[in-house]
Amino acid sequence: MKKNNGHISGGRRAMDHAATAMEQMELYCTARPGSPSAVRRPRLFFRNELWIALLGPTIEEGIVGIGPTVAAALHAFDAQYLAGLHPPVNAAATIGALRWPDAALPRPHRNAKSNPKSHAEVSRFDRPS
């Protein structure tokens, strides 16, 4: 259907745009069958010249990939999805710090001659590690 001096109407253009996006998503997912995009099938949106792949109720609450093409948005989505599955590289240091907080605390100096203590009075800082 033609309108406005031979131009395709906005509704028809949006339908063609959506069909093209779905084809591009199928091609991407077929080429990467185990990818998060292929398995989870995020919704696609086109806003302000960018494609958005979204899994979840909103951008704030979901997993999002944004790019200038459908493939770029799906690739960004895959990266975000996988990043959420793996802890950050420096997480081991953080976990170690959480598990062993006493190691970060300074040990008080104790002179055995000037301040004798019985075993019952030994604080947690005085115990051998």
Image (tube, rainbow, N blue to C red):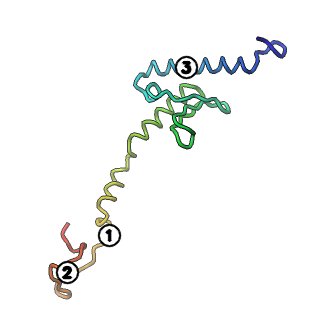
Mark 2 secondary-structure assignment: helix
Amino acid type, label 1: Leu
Picture layout, residue 97 above or below residue 13: below
Q: Position of residue 5 (x, y in %)?
A: 84, 14
Q: Which mark is residue 24?
A: 3
| Precedes in sequence: disc 3 or disc 1 | 3
- According to the picture, the residue beneath numbered tag 2 turns out to be 121
| Precedes in sequence: disc 2 or disc 1 | 1
Mark 3 secondary-structure assignment: helix
Horizontally, residue 46 falls left or right of residue 118, namely right
> Going 38% across and 41% down the picture, which residue do you hit?
86
> Going 32% across and 64% down the picture, which residue do you hit?
101
Question: Which quadrant holds the N terminus?
Answer: top right
> Going 65% across and 20% down the picture, which residue do you hit?
17
Q: Which mark is residue 105?
A: 1
How many numbered discs sit on the rendered protein? Answer: 3
Q: Position of residue 87 (x, y in %)?
A: 38, 45
